[in-house]
Amino acid sequence: MKKTAIIYSFNSNKTAKAAEKIVEAFGNIPVEKVNAEEIDKKKFLAYDNLILGVPTWFDGELPNYWDEFVPELEDLDLKGKTIALYGLGDQHGYPENFGDAVGIMYEILVKNGAKVIGFTSAEDYSYEYSRAEINGKFAGLLLDQENQARLSGTRIKHWVEDLLKEFK
């Protein structure tokens, strides 16, 4: 498999715990952990396959560390990059913008030529609207540790199985 990284904030507890489980699910396949709070263009472009941890903050916003990187990200040519997204959200506390950060990041990546993989079913969630929902599926793995924590392990396992089929 090509050089792969999982990029997430080491300081965002739930996102970091999910990243650990994702890396674990890859088994013996090396996945380098990169702190999103220290990302720059050069480091981002050093990988062929990327997994981005993008939790939704406040009322459907990107976390500060991703928001600060967006201007650089929008200048990158991402053709040849295969990227999967995962994010955390609270479908009951914020039903009108559940997982929106994943949708925001998806739009930026696709606009810049990335191949985004790892779409998941939007079934078994209860929310009003999500910018992450594209044609009835989420543009990545959405985890709700507030309301569906018991489902996260199985969701991660199945998601990584799908990623392994598409990452080269």
Image: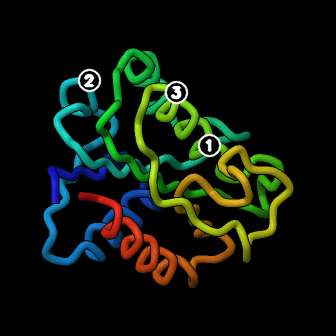
Q: Name the image quarter holding residue 151.
A: bottom right
Q: Which residue is mark 2?
A: 41
Q: Of helix, strand and loop, which one carries label 1?
A: helix
- Could you tell me which residue is drawn at 64 percent across and 77 percent down? 148
Looking at the picture, tell me which residue is in the foreground, 8 or 82. 82
Q: Which residue is mark 1?
A: 103
Kind of residue indicated by mark 1? Gly
Looking at the picture, tell me which residue is in the foreground, 122 or 8. 122
- Could you tell me which residue is drawn at 20 percent across and 41 percent down? 47
Q: Nearer the viewer, mark 2 or mark 3?
A: 3
Q: Of helix, strand and loop, which one carries label 3?
A: helix
Distance from Cα at disc 2 to Cα at disc 3: 17 Å
Q: Of helix, strand and loop, which one carries label 2?
A: helix
Graded by Cα atoms within 10 Å as few (under 14), some (14 to 19) or many (20 or more), the crowding at tag 3 reads few
User: Residue 3 at what x, y percent from top left?
Assistant: 15, 50
Graded by Cα atoms within 10 Å as few (under 14), some (14 to 19) or many (20 or more), the crowding at tag 1 reads many
18 left or right, relative to 135: left
Q: Name the image quarter holding residue 147.
A: bottom right
Q: Which residue is mark 3?
A: 111
Q: Earlier in the sequence, mark 2 or mark 3?
A: 2
